[in-house]
Each structure stands twice: as C-alpha cells, then as structure tokens.
Image: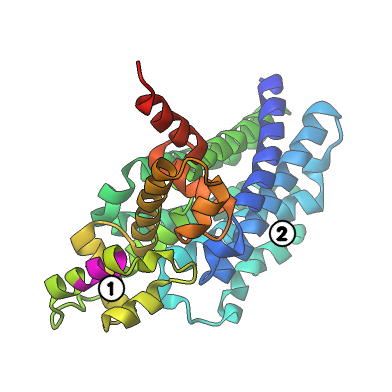
C-alpha cells in the first residue's frame, strides 16, 4: 500500500502543476477571479499535504505532525468552498471578499487545538463543507442531463472525501502510517477523477456557471419572441459568421440580439440545451473542420485563428473535447477517406 501511496503522491503533484497551468488560466475564469485564485490555493494546499505524506511515508520525517500540516489540512475545505461558491451560487458574486474572511478563522485557530483533537476536527470541518456542496449539486438536479458523466465523476470525488473524513475520526485507532497511506491514495484518486473530468469538459467551470445562472433565474423570456431571436442568432452566426470574432462574449452577443445577457443565457439553455461557451465552441469547430477539409495546406494555427480561437492551445483543447481527436488527426482521417482505394 505504501508503494501505491507514493506513486499517487507523485501523480498528485504532477496533476496539480498541470491543472494550474492548463485549466486555471485567466481565459477560463474571466468573470470568476475569486474562483480562480481559490482553485490555485486549493491545488497548493493539496500538494503541500502530499509532500508531507511523502516525507512521512518515505523519509520518516514527521511533517504530518507539524503546525504547518495542520493549518494546511484546515485550509483545504474553505479553499474548495470559496472556489465552488462563485460557480454554484453566482447570484452572490457581488458580495465583498471580506464577507468570506470567517472561513479563514479555523485555519488561524488550528495551531491552538490539542494534538489529539486537531485531525478529527479538521475532517468534521470538511464534512460540513461537503454537505453544502452536495446541497448545491442536488439543487441543480434539473441540469444533470447536460453534465451526467461529469457529475458522476465529481460525485465520486465527494464519496472519496466523505470516506476519508470518516477514517479521520478514528485515525488514532489505526496503525501509525496506515491512515496517511489511505489519505495519500485518496487525494491521488481524486486528482485522477478531476483530470478525467477536465479532459472531457475543459470549459466545465464556465458551462456550470452558465447552467446555474439559467437554473436559478426566474424566467426572463415571457416578453421575448424566442423564435425570432433564434432566427436572428442563426443569421448572425451562419451568414455574418460572428463566431469568427475572437472578442465575442455573452454581453456583446446579447446586445446584437437586443436582449439581456440573462435572457440569452436562459434561451440557449432552455431551447438549445447548452450554454453560450459550448455553443460558440461547437460553431467554431464546425467551421474549422470545413477549413481543414477544404484547405489542406493551411497551418493548424491559421485555421484556429481564422474561426475565432485566440491560440493554438485553445483550438486543440476545444477540438479534442468536441471531436475526440486533434485537428491534425482529423485532417489525416479526412485525407485517408479521400484517397483512392
């Protein structure tokens, strides 16, 4: 078990670096700066825990008994809450950051706790935050059809966290290093599930935020001619090719359609079954596929930029998400199909 724990510790740290560099970019959290910062803090905290587990399991250095480890342990749940809250509760985004300072209080007080009580209390503390998250996800049950597999994977992460929390309550009765082996393995398994989820939906945070806004908003379409707006949207995208504008966002598109951003978001989710970001990526990928088929000599970068993507990495990410392959692989597949038998 120790060997598996060490392997997953290495994987966790590698995954944390990868997620920080690829997922937590500003472009993915343009309207969610707090979520982005707290997500990075969460990755840092989990990496710190795994470094401590490595030191204890492999080097026999008792970092897991230090005050820093205890504070990091207490920081994980608040960091996850403050990461999730703007995405799952967007109507409270306007609240000042100072309103969230009380979440830091347990971290600040953790060095004062007795040694025997600190670890169980940290996991009880974490369970309280998990229950909040479960409640928020349950409230989104009507949107599960759009995120079925992703919610299943993230639900598995929650189950792992609750199981580890239960073990944390009886940690003192377990063999000296067994609990930390199990905890390290659990963090590694959670990273594996998160990596899988993000590979399926790289823009998951944006899509969830859009779906939440549509789910919680009172209907704003009572005075909107939805069919007329959808027809105008079709003209803007198919005739004017507005998707090629790299600066296109929800407010700009809603202004062209002469409706509010909330109305456009609700309309897309209710009538098209997808949020704005997913809709836009699908249009751009369809256009890119036409370019790749019709202009075999054009570079992949030029194709991506011509349909509205801002970089090659964004283009590859979206293409792989929607088509299950890279643009280069798609081009080779098309060329093979065209070649004479």
Q: Secondary structure at mark 2?
A: helix
Residue span colored magenta: 232-237
Residue 216 appears anywhere in the view? no
Q: Label 1's element?
A: helix
Q: Where residue 156 sits: x, y (%)?
A: 44, 38
| Label drawn at residue 110 | 2
Query: Total marks drawn?
Result: 2
Density class for disc 2 (Cα within 10 Å; few <14, some 14-19, many ≥20) is many
Instruction: Tell me the quarter of the picture where residue 271 sits.
Output: bottom left
The residue under the point 29% across, 70% down is 236
Q: Report the residue at 54% width, 53% height from top.
A: 302
Does 104 sit above or below residue 185?
below
58 lies above or below 273: above
Residue 200 x/y as whole percent = 44, 42
Residues 5 and 64: in front is 5
| 63 w.r.t. 173: above or below | below
- Extreme-top residue of the structure: 341
Question: Is the residue under label 1 in contact with that under label 2 (CB below 8 Å)?
Answer: no
Check residue 236 for magenta coloring. yes
The reply to whether residue 15 is visible in this rendering is yes
Q: Where is mark 1, residue-wise?
A: 264
Residue positioned 42% across, 39% down in the render? 153
* Magenta region, main secondary structure: helix
* Quarter containing the C terminus: top left
Q: Position of residue 39 (x, y in %)?
A: 60, 58
Horizontal and vertical percent position of residue 35 = 55, 65
Circle nearer the N terminus (2, 1) = 2
């Amino acid at each position: 078990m120790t060997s598996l724990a060490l392997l997953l510790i290495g994987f966790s740290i590698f995954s944390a670096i990868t997620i920080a560099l690829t997922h937590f970019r500003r472009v993915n959290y343009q309207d969610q700066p707090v979520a982005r910062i707290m997500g990075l803090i969460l990755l840092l905290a989990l990496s710190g825990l795994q470094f401590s587990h490595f030191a204890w399991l492999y080097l026999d250095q008792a970092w897991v008994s230090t005050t820093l480890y205890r504070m990091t342990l207490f920081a994980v749940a608040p960091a996850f809450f403050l990461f999730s809250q703007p995405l799952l509760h967007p109507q409270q985004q306007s609240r000042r950051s100072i309103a969230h300072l009380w979440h830091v209080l347990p971290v600040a007080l953790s060095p004062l706790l007795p040694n025997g009580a600190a670890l169980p209390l940290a996991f009880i503390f974490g369970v309280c935050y998990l229950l909040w998250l479960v409640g928020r996800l349950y409230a989104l049950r009507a949107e599960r059809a759009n995120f079925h597999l992703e919610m299943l994977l993230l639900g598995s992460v929650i189950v792992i966290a609750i199981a580890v929390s239960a073990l944390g309550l009886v940690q003192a009765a377990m063999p000296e290093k067994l609990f930390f082996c199990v905890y390290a393995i659990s963090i590694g398994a959670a990273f594996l599930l998160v990596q899988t989820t993000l590979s399926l939906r790289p823009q998951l945070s944006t899509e969830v935020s859009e779906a939440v806004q549509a789910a919680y908003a009172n209907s704003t379409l009572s005075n909107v001619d939805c069919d007329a707006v959808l027809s105008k949207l079709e003209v803007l995208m198919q005739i004017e090719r507005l998707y090629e504008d790299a600066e296109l966002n929800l407010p700009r598109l809603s202004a062209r359609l002469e409706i509010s951003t909330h109305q456009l978001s609700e309309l897309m989710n209710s009538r098209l079954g997808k949020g704005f970001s997913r809709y836009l990526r699908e249009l751009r990928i369809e256009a890119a596929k036409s370019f790749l088929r019709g202009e075999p000599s054009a570079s992949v970068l030029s194709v991506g930029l011509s349909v509205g993507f801002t970089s090659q990495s964004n283009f590859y990410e979206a293409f792989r998400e929607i088509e299950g392959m890279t643009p280069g692989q798609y081009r080779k597949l098309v060329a093979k199909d065209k070649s004479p038998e």
